[in-house]
Image (cartoon, rainbow, N blue to C red):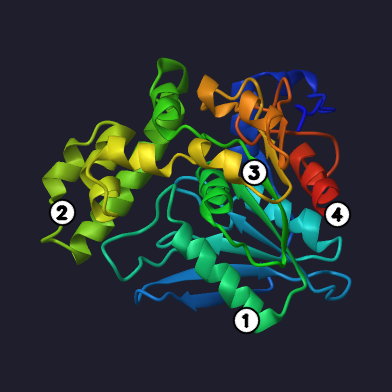
């Protein structure tokens, strides 16, 4: 596919990557009520929770499933914004809380990671079994976007009901993007992620004292250290480098076989240069790459209730 020309025009203040990123994360308010929370029992004995927002004007047998970013949850503004956009236009929306992200710690020592596509697969199967949808579209943000793209590229036979996907602000090269996130320009973001992840690990350590040491958690001073200590080992990888290499969606993008829109702002300070897969998109029948000049990390503000990427997701998914 040719690289898409973006029509996003950021208001003046939102041309700053940091302003748009911080505003969208901390100051945006989305008015929408979650219809219900559903506990999903997973095949390995663990669980995750789905937050459902049902279509406002009747059930059209259409569904969007949405995945969140690192240290996120279904109640983040970008998740609720996507739910509002789609549910008001005839889609049911299932917002995934990854393991331990719904306010309840999961049962196993493992939790979630950027490549844990088995959980997304189980959610899709459950939705098809219980709800009988004719059309499913998928959406993912940041880490959850990487997981989504990996799922699409590694899965040889997707359910026929899956028609399209939209991924936003995706670090498709995990290792290189982590190096970007660790730079001084992103100090406040990386510290915030680190604090939240360490607090979650302290809670996990109380349940699994033989698996992880509290002092080792305290010694972690970077996201890389967290991935070396916990994320890689708990999920069966040799080390952080092995985890990044095997879970980066970049290598799976050429195999994507359904229409997929990837929106990465050129000024997203979280992303490495390799997370803008121009050559792959040019040679792909299905991957549509849009790179607005501005938007930061999931910060595509525009006038009105919806953000630009939400309007684009609705427009893109309607076509298939």
Of the image marks 1 and 4, the number of the one nearer the N terminus: 1
Q: Residue at x 72, y 24 (%)?
A: 14
Q: Nearer the viewer, residue 279 or 127?
A: 279
Position of 48 with respect to 4 (left or right) is left
Of the image marks 3 and 2, the number of the one nearer the N terminus: 3
Q: How many angstroms separate mark 2 from mark 4 (CA)?
A: 47 Å
Of the image marks 2 and 4, the number of the one nearer the N terminus: 2
Q: Is residue 188 above or below residue 57?
A: above
Residue pointed to by mark 1: 129
Q: How many angstroms separate mark 1 from mark 3 (CA)?
A: 25 Å
Q: State which mark lies toward you, 1 or 2.
A: 1
Q: How many angstroms separate mark 3 from mark 2 (CA)?
A: 34 Å
Residue 110 visible at all: yes
Q: Is residue 286 above or below residue 52?
A: above
Q: How many angstroms separate mark 4 from mark 3 (CA)?
A: 16 Å
Q: Is residue 169 above or below residue 154?
A: above
Q: Which mark is residue 212?
A: 2
Rendering quarter of residue 22: top right
Q: State which mark lies toward you, 1 or 3.
A: 1
Q: Residues within 10 Å of mark 4 (few under 14, many from 20)?
A: few
Residue pointed to by mark 4: 318
């Amino acid at each position: 596919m040719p690289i898409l020309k973006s029509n996003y025009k950021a208001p003046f203040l939102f041309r700053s990557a940091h302003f748009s990123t911080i505003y969208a994360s901390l100051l945006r308010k989305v008015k929408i009520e979650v219809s219900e929370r559903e506990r999903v029992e997973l095949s390995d004995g663990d669980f995750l929770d789905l937050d459902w927002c049902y279509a406002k004007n009747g059930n059209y047998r259409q569904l969007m499933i949405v995945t969140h970013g690192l240290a996120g949850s279904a109640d983040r503004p970008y998740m609720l914004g996507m739910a509002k956009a789609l549910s008001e236009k005839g889609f049911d929306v299932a917002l995934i809380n990854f393991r331990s992200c719904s306010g309840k710690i999961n049962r196993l020592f493992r939790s979630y990671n950027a490549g844990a596509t088995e959980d997304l697969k189980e959610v899709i199967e459950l939705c098809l079994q219980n709800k009988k949808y004719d059309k499913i579209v998928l959406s993912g943000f940041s880490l959850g976007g990487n997981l989504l793209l990996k799922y699409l590229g590694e899965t040889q036979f997707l359910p026929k009901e899956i028609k399209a996907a939209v991924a936003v602000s995706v670090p498709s090269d995990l290792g290189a993007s982590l190096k970007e996130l660790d730079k001084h320009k992103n100090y406040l973001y990386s510290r915030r992620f680190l604090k939240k992840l360490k607090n979650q690990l302290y809670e996990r350590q109380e349940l699994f004292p033989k698996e992880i040491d509290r002092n080792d958690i305290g010694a972690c001073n970077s996201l890389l250290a967290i991935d070396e200590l916990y994320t890689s080992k708990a999920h069966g990888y040799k080390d952080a480098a092995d985890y990044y290499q095997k879970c980066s969606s970049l290598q799976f993008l050429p195999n994507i076989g359904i229409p997929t829109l990837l929106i990465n702002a050129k000024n997203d300070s979280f992303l490495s240069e390799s997370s803008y897969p121009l050559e792959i998109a040019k040679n792909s029948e299905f991957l549509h790459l849009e790179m607005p000049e501005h938007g930061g990390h999931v910060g595509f503000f525009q006038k009105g209730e919806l953000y630009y990427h939400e309007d684009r997701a609705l427009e893109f998914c309607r076509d298939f």
